[in-house]
Image (cartoon, rainbow, N blue to C red):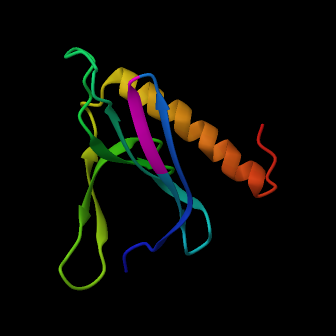
Amino acid sequence: MPQQLVKVLNRRTTDGKISMWGILHLNSNGGRLAGWLCDSWTEAGASASEVLLPRLCWLSKEDDKFYLAYLNIPFVGNSKLELGDVDKDIEPRREAFMRAALAEWENEYFTTQGVQVT
């Protein structure tokens, strides 16, 4: 049976011309962190060398790697998140920006849940 995920935190941020959103998911069986579904891009006005096209990713908490992610939304029934391969082409500045924001949001989540983060 596929893993069932529960959304527990949803955030969005912009820093200069780069933006992103992320949704933290828990595994419904055991309540452990499963990962982050996230997307990042550059806003209008970024120079050609700065442009980051939107890219849907899954940051797995199992191995701390970004995977390409695809939403399978049928006409009828439940949608599914499908994971592709590890994103080997992720741009270093995209990855750094996303990791920093996701770490901040994760610490925020733990703090609101009363978990001590060191």
**Residue at left 34%, top 46%?**
57
Q: Residue 8: image x %, image y %? A: 58, 63
Q: Residue 67: image x %, image y %? A: 32, 46
Task: Locate residue 35 relative to residue 83 in the image: left or right.
Answer: right
Q: Nearer the viewer, residue 75 or 46?
A: 46
The region drawn magenta spans 17-22
Q: Residue furthest front?
A: 45
**Residue at left 39%, top 28%?**
18
- Can residue 19 be found in the magenta stretch? yes
Q: Residue furthest bottom?
A: 76
Quadrant in which the C terminus is drawn = top right
Is residue 80 depicted above or below 103 in this figure? below
Q: Nearer the viewer, residue 47 or 49?
A: 47
Is residue 80 depicted above or below 116 in this figure? below
Q: How many marks?
A: 0
**Residue at left 68%, top 43%?**
107
**Residue at left 27%, top 40%?**
54
Quarter occupied by residue 4: bottom left
Q: Main secondary structure of the magenta part?
A: strand
Q: Residue 39: image x %, image y %? A: 36, 44
Quadrant in which the N terminus is drawn = bottom left
- Can residue 76 be found in the magenta stretch? no
Q: Residue 59: image x %, image y %? A: 43, 46
Task: Locate residue 9 relative to residue 82 in the image: left or right.
Answer: right
Quarter occupied by residue 95: top left
